[in-house]
Amino acid sequence: MKLLKIVSFGGIGILLVVLITATILEKLYGTSFSSRYIYHSYGFVGLWGIAAVAGIAYTLKRKLYRFPITFSLHLSLALILTGAMVTFLFGRQGNIHLRINSPAQQMFCDEKGDSIPLPFRIKLNGFRIDYYPGTQAPMDYVSQLTVTDGSLDDNGTVSMNNIYTYRHYRFYQSAYDPDGNGVTLAVSHDPYGIGITYAGYALLTLSFLLFFFVPDSGFRKLLRHPLLRKGTVTATIIVLGCLPAVSAETNRPNVLPPNVADAFGNLYVYYNDRICPLQTLARDFTMKLYGKSVYKGLTAEQVLTGWLFYYDDWKNEPIIRIKSKDVQQRLGITGYARLTDFIGKEGYKLKETRRSNAPALRGAKEADEKFNLISMAATGSLFKIYPYRPTNNGPMTWISMVDQQPQGMTPDQWLFIRKSIGLIAEQIIRNNNKQALFFIGKIKKYQEKEAADILPSPLKFKAEKLYNMLRHTRPVAMVCLSIGIISFILCCRSMSRRKRINPILRTVLLALLGGIGVYLLAVICLRGYVSGHLPLSNGFETMQFMAVCVILLTFICCRRFEAVIAFGYMLGGLALLVSMLGEANPPITQLMPVLASPLLSIHVVTIMIAYSLLAFAMMNGITALLLSRSHHDCTEQIARLEVISRLLLYPAVCCLALGIFIGAVWANVSWGRYWGWDPKEVWALITMLIYASALHPASLPFFRRPMFFHWFCVIAFASVLITYFGVNFIMGGMHSYA
């Protein structure tokens, strides 16, 4: 039995080392290198086989079949690996290129470039791109196919997240030709492997669900642990920093009166491949330039329209935030630049950025983008506020006052587009705000007349404006972190002195945290309603959701573990702060076709819950390590923290495993394979294997030692950080949010 244990757990340990090495080699030498020499090698597959066979033999030797649910969990993993082995040995993947009005094809190319015959012929009858209404953003790619099998013909449709299957051959939308008359379809033939793997997924899901209800499971035993029946000792306080006083700015540039600027904000504009309030464009414009949505007490609408109507004033305003020290030196400024700082005796100071793609010039490129953005605002090309529907029933287009006249547009319509902004400017010069508002209203009526069927509903329009007002999460993040850090320090101090929390203080802390959770949930719901899909498609949105998960878990756990309140503030604040690392608040965009699947939301939600639980276990570990340094005897508190962390680990590993396998099903539906050894997939697997090892204290006795377990929870969390951040910002891959 000892040899089986060494082979099974040792094999998993070797696999972890190989997987980590493979991701590093992929970064250094490319995907093809790691695929050829590691992922698709017989040695790598053999290592998985040895670990799996030894693991099943070890479970049988330990008579784990006496515990049916636990045994079925391990059996499901073996079934999944069996399906993967069958796919590796007998599955075929490749692609086929089809053209409209071309002869039917009966061959496809596999991953090695070899031609593989099909037992039938396949032909492309048509291809189209479906767009989001009134935009040029693709919503779906649709191919119409005909399969000829002897004397039989079968018609099928392939689109994103919609496969066509014939005789166990599965066809997926992969790419299309620039002229729109041809497509490349991914082809997968795996008649047995997918079925076996899916059976393993189903068994794993059922086993996990039943595991939490079996009276003699490790999870239920921990729930009945005597240390959880005692009240938790903690103390927390609220610290609210006073906001610094801001003096009124007297040297502000000329701007439109607030009511006139607000009227501009109420116009529709075509921005980021969607139709939205001009207020959204103004806010993103100001954030991009200045880093904040307000400048010298001026609204974002006043800033944006200021560049259009008062360019001579604004070109001397130090509003352009320059992060790069090198660029600051080139422009001769510190911190913020004026538009005039970009021009010197030699001309445009950053002109070399337009001729190079060197990574070292990233800061210069960012500054150059801001310069170009201002140019678009000042000339009016950014204001695509005029919808035009061609007479030939072509797609709706949105143009600005400086664009070329579309073919077929009437002279009167073109005259209105060219002159309306000029008329508003004339009234502004005359200080006739009432007449300026009248002409802005005329533009709004023009928009409603020409694009009535594709404009956002009034409710969605108001919802987006409300979202623009509420999306200020940075102050919330700082408040959460301030409360959390101080609460955590005092929590450790109080636990070492065996004191209890004041009930009133506890209620206040929970009420405030609940208010923050409601606010975040409202912001997320508004963003989801405006975008038309669940807001879980990028790093910003997923970290916002993780903050909500952390707050929800805090309320679930606080009854038995009051110290979790401090953790909730800290982790929620960190999640909000991390969500703003790349960009303070990325603009709402249309969902990419491949992401338009309900499995995406389930996958992300499940993974985020797992990460939140693992983060709580990590914080428990840090607390225990600090208590171990205390001058007081904290043995009981440390042991209790260990029980809580073990309790959290079961649902965390469960959610992590289910999230990975839901993602695999989604990948199989979208790309034709459920596992592609992408760096994020690999590191998610690494994280699951690392934490799953801690659920085997009977086989790995060092996990029974409380301090070892706490150290493990702290160090193992590094794998979570690498999975989410390391892959996103360093390794890349198709799962990267960076």
Image (tube, helix red, strand yellow):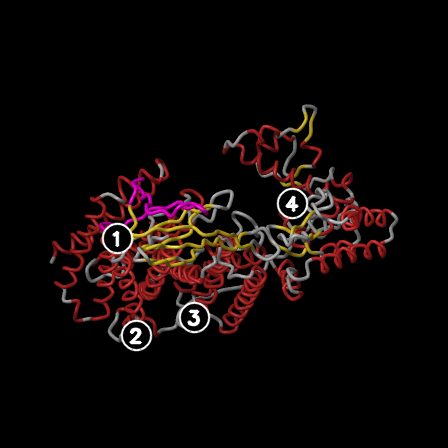
Residue at label 3?
556
How crowded pointer 2 is (Cα within 10 Å; few <14, some 14-19, many 20+) is rated as few
Q: Which residues are magenta?
A: 88-116
- Quick one: SS at disc 4? helix
Residue for point 41% across, 58% down: 156
- Which numbered disc covers residue 213? 2
How crowded pointer 3 is (Cα within 10 Å; few <14, some 14-19, many 20+) is rated as few
Location of residue 399 in the rendering, given as x and y in whole percent from the top left corner: 69, 48
- Quick one: SS at disc 2? loop
Label 3, label 2: how many angstroms apart (C-alpha)? 18 Å
Residues marked 3 and 1 touching at CB (< 8 Å):
no
Q: Amino acid at mark 1?
A: Thr
Q: Nearer the viewer, mark 1 or mark 2?
A: 1
Residue at label 4?
290
Q: Is residue 399 visible?
A: yes
Q: Nearer the viewer, mark 4 or mark 3?
A: 4
